[in-house]
Image: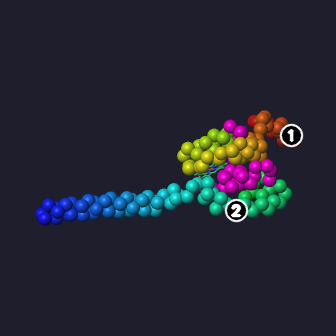
Amino acid sequence: MKNNFEDQVKALSRTLLLFLFLLVFLIGGLFYFKMYPEKLHSKKETFKEIVDVDTEIENGIHIETGFVADEGMEVTIQNCTNCHSAKLVTQNRMSKEGWKATIKWMQETQNLWDLGSNEDLIVSYLAKNYAPVAKGRRQNLEDIEWYELE
Ligand code: HEC
């Protein structure tokens, strides 16, 4: 009789311990997702929700973002305007390598997702429409009124 009672107590404490573990696990999970809510969704899903591209174009410029209308613009808008304004992209001028490096930097440090098969299209679009402007040597000065130093 005594043995049986002890067994029951042991079984009960084991069950309680199991519940305690589950509780700790549950609370830990709740805290984790409260701190990192983005982990609940896959990144690819979230950006489709956020960016609903309005395709209105005027004089070759996409009105809402200021992007130049060209092949690859839509996919660039979808992937490049969620975290910062489109201006941060359009005010820059870079070569293909430069754009690739910027994207790589954002992927490594700013949580930018893998662009997959869209990367080539985006980089080509950017390198074509936001290429470095070659300045070369400045133009000669004309119509200057020179004066003598005394
Ligand atoms: C996941 C978020 C995120 C996405 C998406 C994103 N970026 Fe960024 N990007 C950042 C952050 C953060 C910065 C730094 C902003 C700052 O300095 O204020 C940044 C900065 C930049 C800069 C400025 C870099 C510099 O040297 O100052 C450029 C250009 C840029 N992004 C282009 C792009 C392009 C092109 C895309 C699409 C392929 C893109 N971004 C998508 C997060 C993102």
What amino acid type is highlighted by mark number 1? Glu
- Of badges 2 and 1, the one in the foreground is 2
| Relative image position of residue 118 (x, y in whole percent) | 70, 47
Is disc 1 surrounded by few (<14), some (14 to 19) or many (20+) residues within 10 Å? Answer: few
Q: Position of residue 75 (x, y in %)?
A: 72, 52
Evaluate whether residue 15 shows in this view: yes
Q: Is residue 91 magenta?
A: yes
Task: Classify residue 63 as left or right of residue 25.
Answer: right
Image: 116 above or below 52: above
Q: Is residue 86 visible?
A: no
Q: In which quadrant of the rendered view does residue 20 lie?
A: bottom left
Q: Position of residue 48 (x, y in %)?
A: 65, 59
Whether tag 2 and tag 1 are in contact, CB under 8 A, the answer is no
The earlier-in-sequence mark between 2 and 1 is 2
Looking at the image, which residue is at 24% across and 64% down? Answer: 12
Left or right placement of residue 61 versus residue 97 in this view: right
- Bounds of the magenta span? 69-97
State the SS at label 2.
Answer: loop
Q: Nearer the viewer, residue 38 or 135?
A: 38
Q: Is mark 2 within 8 Å of ligand 1?
A: no
Query: In the image, residue 7 lies at what x, y percent?
Result: 19, 60
| Amino acid under disc 2 | Asp
The residue singled out by tag 2 in the image is 52
Q: Which residue is drawn at the image coordinates 64% and 62% (left, top)?
A: 49
The residue at which mark 1 appears reads as 142
Q: Within the image, what quadrant is residue 61 found in?
A: bottom right
139 and 36: which is toward the camera: 36
Residue 81, numbered label: none
Q: Quadrant of the C terminus?
A: top right
Kindly report the distance in space between the C-alpha atoms of the residues bearing marks 2 and 1.
51 Å
Task: Name the image quarter holding residue 119.
Answer: top right
Viewport quadrant of the N terminus:
bottom left
